[in-house]
Amino acid sequence: MMTGGRAIYPRLQALFNLSDAELLEYAQFLHDVADIVTLDPIYNAPMRDPNDLIVLQTAKFGSADLLCTRDADFFTPAVISYCAKSGIEICDEAAAARRLGLSLD
């Protein structure tokens, strides 16, 4: 996506071989289907990395039932228990694909 003559997400464009138009179309799609979640600046949860609180809050306040991540901090017993109380399952992409009946092949 270009703004002011420079690419905004060059790494994503290179990784997925996306044109500016495709990236803009995808960003518009996400905007159209997204639910805006208001975050609490004093939210507290048993996370080691404070940057992960945004992800956890978004899942909780957005009523997610699945949080797919590779971040090991989400797989600690304390975080898994905390999320389970909100009905959120923590899993990696392979488990998420199985749960959704998809194949990663």
Image: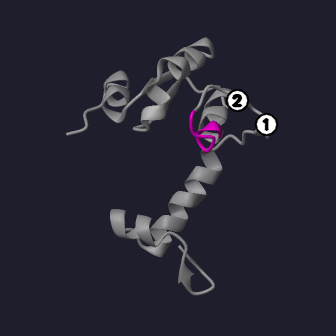
Q: Which mark is residue 31?
A: none
Q: Are marks 2 and 1 in contact (CB under 8 Å)?
A: yes
In which quarter of the view is residue 84 placed? top right
Identify the magenta region.
48-53
- Please, which residue is most extreme toward the front here? 48
Q: Secondary structure at mark 1?
A: loop
* x, y percent for residue 41: 79, 40
Q: CA distance from mark 2 to mark 1?
A: 9 Å
Residue 17 magenta-drawn? no
Residue at 49% x, 72% y: name it: 21
Q: What count of labels does the image hold?
A: 2
Q: How is the image coloured?
A: one colour
Circle 2 residue: 61
From this viewpoint, is residue 70 visible?
yes
Circle nearer the N terminus (2, 1):
1
Amino acid residing under circle 2: Phe
Q: In the image, what residue occupies the spot 48% across and 74% down?
A: 20
Drawn side of residue 11 relative to residue 1, left or right? left
Q: Is residue 51 above or below residue 80?
A: below
Q: Is residue 25 left or right of residue 72?
A: right
For badge 1, the amino acid type reads Asp
Residue picked out by circle 1: 40
